[in-house]
Amino acid sequence: MSAFRTAIVLVVIVAALVALSAALLVQRVDPATIGVKVNQLGGGIVEQDFRTGYHLGIVGVHRWTVLDGRVHFVSFARDGEEYKGSKENVEATSSLDIRTSDNNTASLDVTVAYRILPGRGWRIVQDGLTFNYRDRARQAIQGVLREELSQLSPDDFVKTDVRLARVEAAMPALAASLEQYHLVPLSILIRAVRFPDKYEEQLQLKQLTRQKALLAEARQREEQQEQVTQSIEKETEALAKRLVGEWDKRLQEASSDNQVRIAEILAAAEIYARTTTADADATHTAAIAEGQLALANAEALRDQLRNAALDTAGGRILLARQAAENLRIDEVTLNSNDPSVPSVLDLDELVRMLLGAKRDQ
């Protein structure tokens, strides 16, 4: 049991030593931050940006400076308006006042996004800009925007394509101005434009007049398109009628041709039927006549052969026998004393008597 306790104590001691060593020898750089290490024993700033993770940092030997690695914003907005986002990476200031190309004043709400150049965080610390690079960035952005956006007229602010082109053209100048502070711009967003009240009314009237002119042009184009559409509709209707007429004509011609062909086929069929029927009737009549003739010849031949057969001795015997068989005698008187009288029960004797043959002695 004591050995088990000793092992537990050793594990706790080792864990404590490891934790203490980590605290004394390792520096943790949080996400969305940039770590800059300075060697206090010589060598100065390490020329490297340390990103998220754990890095060698000996207490008493190395000193660390942490910079915000997120996107930064400079928000120019009307006085008194509160920026609703996180303020840690936002530099909020009053609206940007400029003088336009036609010498009128304007108040702009603008948001500019920028960030630290990759791999240049240590340069900010080296140049002593750790705590004021944001102020320098705001001043540089304000100066560039006033110079670039002052080239626009009030009418240009209304035109989206012109305004966006001007913003795009301002990016190189802004990048050059921020590069000296080791920063890079990401985007410029003009959120609102305000002019003095009286001039604003004039602009609104001017815009209304322009909108009315655009509306009149749109209506004129609409009327022109309606005319074109009506013309196309009429042409289409005429073309449809012409095509329908042509197809009706073709259908009528095809129908007439079909009717003629059907009549021809029916006539040919009628002629064929009548011809075939007549031929069949003639053949039938001839076949019946031939059959009757053959039957008559056969009957004549039968009678002839029968007569010839009956004309022979055998035939006469057959006839006599049939006569004897068919002889009907209602009453017979037998004379037993006269042996020459034949018995009607003796057919052979009766046949000889009918034939006139003599009895055998």
Image: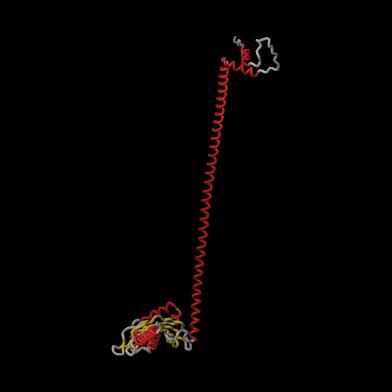
Quadrant of residue 278 within the rendered picture: top right
Q: Residue at x 52, y 55 (%)?
A: 244
Question: Foreground residue, 312 or 16?
Answer: 16
Q: Is residue 330 visible?
A: yes
- The answer to whether residue 144 is seen in the rendering is no
Q: Quadrant of the N terminus?
A: bottom left
Residue 253 in picture, x, y percent from top left: 52, 49
Please state which of residues 41 and 119 is positioned toward the viewer in this rendering.
41
**What is the tally of numbered marks visible in this picture?**
0
Residue 138 image position (x, y, % from top left)? 40, 87
Residue 125: name its quadrant: bottom left
Quarter occupied by the C terminus: top right
Q: Position of residue 140 (x, y in %)?
A: 38, 86
Residue that appears at 64% across and 16% down: 346
How are the residues colored?
secondary structure
| Residue 162: x %, y % from top left | 42, 78
**Which residue is situated farthest in the front direction here?**
1
Q: Residue furthest left?
A: 42
**In the picture, residue 65 is in which quadrant?**
bottom left
Residue 80 vs residue 323: left or right? left
